[in-house]
């Protein structure tokens, strides 16, 4: 089991996707860069359920490339021995940005896209754009990904490139063409992303699931230093502790952290947060106490 620490460096996005729950929640807050370095340095010696943090991910369900010091942050994490992973919508992935990220030591790039036609893309990721703007935006993303792959090959650096393809009633018929298109472009992985949200918080009982597939392997740290258990949007209301106050190690000893994972381990439906019960991440895997 490997552990990923996700950083929401900036609570802001340059898109207003129709399927995204963050558009009305974003505050524009920035995680102070000095705080970022402090946390990353501390994470080198931290053990979570006996496992070390191996990957620093930059997303937090916002757009990390809006953060002015994103390449510096990637470089700092990489220089401290972590794998680095950026998740982006691809719009700001210019040739200059691509080269800077690769030089900084980026391990993995994921670009999220909601379809393989302009109509589908506009319906989801360019919901606030007119037809001509949506078309320009769509092809900008495609060309930026191609450009990133070309630059990493020119620089002779290995960076895993993944496409997160959002499955929806509109994009599903385009999924096959998406596979062949991105394979020919040269991406390493194509991940078909399904929605996480259940309509009813009690739906998870129907699946007989006993443990979450997202925790304890994935934490998110927001600009205020709050630590969330995963990247599911409603989990932003679940705070395990604050690493600005007494460091990340204090979060692991906090009442909130222990109560949360105790409830999951015992599958205590009276204590599991509503956010978790509304997420399809609850799936069959060994009990958390076995880790």
Image (cartoon, helix red, strand yellow):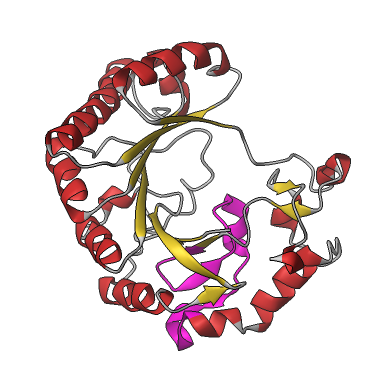
Q: Position of residue 76 (x, y in %)?
A: 25, 66
Q: Determine the image quadrant of residue 235.
A: bottom right
Kindly identify the residue that appears in the image at 27 percent across and 16 percent down. 132
Residue 78 in the image: above or below residue 187: below
Please say whether residue 242 is one of the residues in the magenta stretch: yes
177 sits left or right of 63 in the view: right
Residue 7 visible, this orientation = no
Q: Residue furthest bottom?
A: 246
Q: Determine the image quadrant of residue 140.
A: top left
Residue 287 in the image: above or below residue 152: below
Q: Position of residue 289 (x, y in %)?
A: 75, 68
Q: Position of residue 144 (x, y in %)?
A: 23, 30
Kindly identify the residue that appears in the image at 29 percent across and 69 percent down. 80
Q: Which residues are magenta?
A: 220-248
Q: Position of residue 247 (x, y in %)?
A: 45, 84
276 sits left or right of 161 in the view: right
Kindly identify the residue that appears in the image at 41 percent across and 22 percent down. 122
Kindly identify the residue that appears in the image at 75 percent across and 39 percent down. 199
Please say whether residue 228 is one of the residues in the magenta stretch: yes
Residue 53 visible, this orientation = yes
289 sits left or right of 103 in the view: right
Q: Determine the image quadrant of residue 36.
A: bottom left
For the C terminus, which image quadrant?
bottom right
Q: Nearer the viewer, residue 68 or 4?
A: 4
Q: Nearer the viewer, residue 253 or 239?
A: 253
């Amino acid at each position: 089991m490997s552990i990923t620490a996700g950083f929401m460096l900036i609570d802001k996005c340059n898109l207003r996707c129709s399927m995204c729950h963050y558009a009305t929640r974003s505050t524009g807050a920035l995680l102070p860069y000095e705080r970022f370095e402090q946390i990353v340095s501390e994470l080198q010696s931290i053990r979570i359920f006996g496992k070390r943090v191996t990957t620093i991910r930059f997303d937090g369900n916002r757009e990390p490339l809006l953060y002015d010091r994103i390449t510096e942050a990637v470089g700092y994490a990489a220089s401290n021995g972590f794998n680095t992973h950026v998740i982006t919508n691809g719009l700001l992935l210019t040739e200059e940005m691509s080269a800077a990220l690769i030089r900084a030591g980026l391990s993995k790039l994921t670009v999220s896209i909601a379809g393989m036609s302009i109509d589908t893309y506009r319906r989801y990721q360019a919901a606030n754009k007119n037809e001509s703007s949506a078309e320009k935006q769509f092809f900008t993303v495609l060309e930026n990904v191609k450009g990133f792959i070309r630059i990493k090959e020119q620089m002779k650096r290995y960076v895993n490139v993944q496409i997160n393809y959002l499955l929806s009633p509109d994009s599903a018929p385009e999924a096959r063409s998406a596979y062949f298109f991105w394979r020919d472009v040269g991406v390493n992985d194509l991940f078909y992303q399904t929605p996480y949200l259940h309509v009813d918080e009690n739906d998870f009982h129907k699946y007989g699931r006993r443990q979450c597939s997202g925790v304890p392997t994935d934490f998110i740290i927001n600009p205020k230093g709050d630590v969330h258990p995963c990247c599911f949007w409603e989990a932003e209301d679940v705070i395990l502790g604050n690493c600005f106050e007494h460091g990340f190690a204090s979060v692991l000893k906090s009442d909130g952290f222990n109560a949360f994972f105790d409830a999951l381990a015992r599958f205590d439906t009276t204590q599991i947060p509503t956010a978790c019960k509304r997420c399809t991440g609850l799936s069959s895997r060994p009990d958390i106490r076995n880790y």
